[in-house]
Image (tube, rainbow, N blue to C red):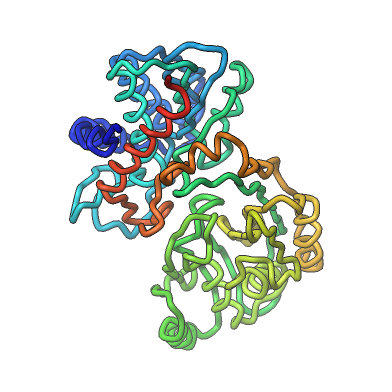
Amino acid sequence: MTDWLKEANAQREDYLTDLISLMKIESVRDDEQATADYPLGPGPAQALAAFLEMADQDGFRTRNIDNLVGYAEWGEGDETLAILAHLDVMPAGNGWDTDPFDPVIKDGNLIGRGASDDKGPGMAAYYALKTLKDQGAHFNKKVRFIVGTDEEADWTGMHRYFEVEPAPTFGFSPDAEFPVINGEKGQVSMLLDLPGGNGDGDLLKSFDAGLRFNMVPREATAVVEVADNEDLVTRFTAFLDENPVTGSIEVEPDGAHIEVIGKAAHGMEPEKGINAATYLATFLKQLRLGGFAKDFVAYVADYLHLDTRMDKFNAAFSDPVMGEMTMNAGLLSFDQQTGAHIDMNFRYPKGITPDEIKAAVAKVAEPLHFTVTYQDGEVPHYVDPADPLVQTLMKRGVAFGALMPTTTNTMHQANEFQPVNDLIMSMAIYMEAIHDLVTD
């Protein structure tokens, strides 16, 4: 019997060298720098080019599709196994102890943006495929290792892939947890918009929080104008003492500048973060605000604060197989001139629709003068546990991964890390999975 872990450990040095080279590329989507050559900005395209050059040198057949998505292919046959990974990463944000794009290994952990989501796991799966190829394993099916560059936003690359390439026969993605996840929740964003304007009394000049819709905001800032700044500072100091956040307040000529710092987390598990935006709104609710500013703060403080399951909307939903619907308030802004915008991101199981989610949000938001729309998202995906693919991947814990059950999930957080030994173990698991799925 093959010792897969031994085979994976033999690749450790080369794997880490290639992985770290990819992690040094700041492959964050940047629409402000988008061009015809770099449709998602230069970073994602550079990471894709670097990976495909690596795969080409390793002897794979490769293709770059419009600098949006690409693949490395090996094997022959009428059926195709797809391994789907992504090279884009979330913005680093603040709060790091090291440079997020200069990875380090400390106490056995690889630290840097992409270590866990998804460059570390993706490269583990790639090295599993590469090792089998280099050993001369006979593939009875094609294997396409497909890498997208926009998983953290709109899946632009994968949508483009399926416009120009045939759908694979079956596949898995090293972008989750062990063991097998055979059901993937759908995803949709509810977009709330509100006009600008204050009434009599205190003024909310601006409010800003969030880097991405699927990331719990770590920082939130506001500029307010009140009659008694000294009292405001006293109340804010007391607020910080009473809540699990830090922050600062500075009185400037244009008003008091307030910052609240919480904890970032992945939008699929918003309860693991501390949403700085909703905490800031609960403080601002003490002010004598009027007009649309009052509506904005009331909605965030009364309905979004400490609610990740739609309980305050009387709309919590759970599927016995896929679990609870989750809600993350990821992007929140208010400008007294141009208005407010909130992006609420939902991960929803089978059994509920975006229209039903929108109706629940609108019932609460529209009386506060918000308009509610939603963007196209991803529908829930479910594969029956009896499916042969799931059965094969469940052998000896072989599954999507690469997050181990005992490892802390730091995706989308500062100081993102993955234990190196976990990544090597994942490589071994992927070797066995691919071997069992496509070799004689």
The quadrant where residue 157 appears = top right
Which residue is painted at 64% across and 81% down in the image?
288
Q: What is the residue that sits farthest to the front in this orientation?
A: 1
Residue 95 x %, y %: 33, 60
Residue in front for this viewpoint, 400 or 118? 400
Percent position (x, y) of residue 243?
46, 81
Residue situated in front as seen by the camera: 163 or 407: 407
The residue that appears at 54% across and 78% down in the rendered structure is 283
Q: In the visual, does 208 lie left or right of 5?
A: right
The quarter of the picture where residue 125 lies is: top left
User: Total number of numbered labels?
Assistant: 0
Whether residue 343 can be seen here: no
Quadrant location of the N terminus in the rendered image: top left
The structure residue drawn at horizontal position 69% and vertical position 71%, both measured from the top left corner, is: 311
- Residue 90 visible? The answer is yes
Camera-nearest residue between 182 and 6 = 6
Task: Residue 340: give x, y in percent of width and height.
Answer: 65, 58
Query: Looking at the image, is 111 positioned above or below residue 39?
Result: below
On-image quarter of the C terminus: top left
202 sits to left or right of 292 = left
Residue nearest the viewer, comparing 358 with 13: 13
Taking the image as shown, residue 78 lies to the left or right of residue 320, namely: left
User: Residue 21's x, y, as percent?
Assistant: 26, 32
